[in-house]
Amino acid sequence: MEQKIVKIGSAELAAKLYGAFDANMKLVEAAFAVTVHNRPDVSGYGEVLTVSGSTPEGVDAAARAIETLARMGERSETLAEQTVLYVINMVRDGREGELEAFDENCICVTAKGKPIKPKTVGQQKYIESIRNNTIVLGTGPAGTGKTFLAVAMAVKALRDKKVSRIILTRPAIEAGEKLGYLPGDLQSKIDPYLRPLYDALFEMMGPENYQRNVEKQIIEVAPLAYMRGRTLDDAFIILDEAQNATFEQMKMFLTRLGNNSKAVVTGDLTQTDLPGGQVSGLWSAVKILDGIEGISIHQFTERDVVRHKLVQKIILAYDKYEKENQNKDKGGHTYRRKNY
């Protein structure tokens, strides 16, 4: 039987590591086929965790995961299940050292005082891309924080007076058929399409502060069609759900960029809703703009999903299904995927 000792700074931190009903430590034990026991350190240091298992590789990996989680626990109020699973996967890949790079990297603080930080290495690299480039194309599955982190960076830029306004936009792809049937004026009709952007801004700034900035035209949330013919200077511009922008719309948006402005384009290339088999403008932009200085293309993966753990499993299941059924539908007929 192999064993390794891990010293934890306090009983409170040990309790955080274990989680409610020892749920966190059970995940570590199951992942690396080990058992973990804790006891007070007789030297007064805090708590001592003994990791035991049948293989030195499993014991060493479990100890590294616990040490990494302990460092993260010292800087956060809780250790969520998703965080524990992410650390386990990083340790399995021998990449836990990368996690230290973003432990203290707070982007901004919400209206309720909650710090916004990247939760995965992919998110950290996305933030760095936004800091260091004029245009960033962020693609990847749902739940990876593409829009939320972009809004956080926009709010930070506004607070730091690096820009004078924030412009958030989305293509209202259903407008041609469904928009007219909704009640109310034009603003009421387009609000459902822009709701995710409102939600992110409300959390960052608070509803009252957000409303004041809208009235002062410091913040603008509008459909993509409203961007035509404009030059956007001194602004942080976010195009969300860009997989639903056409080739022409994407070119139009990217050429709106003015002096002292930054643009972030986000979307999931597997979820385009464009009619008639049209090619996604985001897909084209990723191909056309790759390698241009000042433009960064960041690809999130399922490992960057920070929503419920089932979201990650759902994404993987759909990816597997699409690969297995790429050329056939349920009836055995030829199946053609959309051009993403």
Image (cartoon, rainbow, N blue to C red):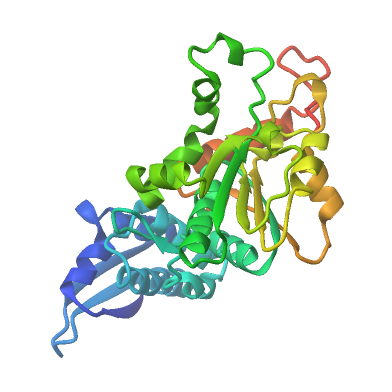
Which residue sits at x=15%, y=90%?
A: 43
- State the image quarter where residue 212 is shown: top left
Which residue sits at x=83%, y=18%?
A: 334
Toward the bottom, the furthest residue is 43
Q: How many marks?
A: 0
- Whether residue 115 appears in this view of the structure is yes
Toward the right, the furthest residue is 288
Above/below status of 233 relative to 215: below
Image x and y of residue 159, in percent: 46, 63
Q: Quadrant of the C terminus?
A: top right
Residue 17 horizontal side relative to residue 266, left or right: left
Residue 137 horizontal side relative to residue 103, left or right: right
Which residue sits at x=23%, y=70%?
A: 13
Q: Quadrant of the N terminus?
A: bottom left
Image x and y of residue 175, in percent: 65, 19
Which residue sits at x=28%, y=60%?
A: 78
User: Of 241 and 259, which appears nearest the observer?
Assistant: 259
Above/below status of 35 relative to 80: below
Image x and y of residue 217, in percent: 51, 45
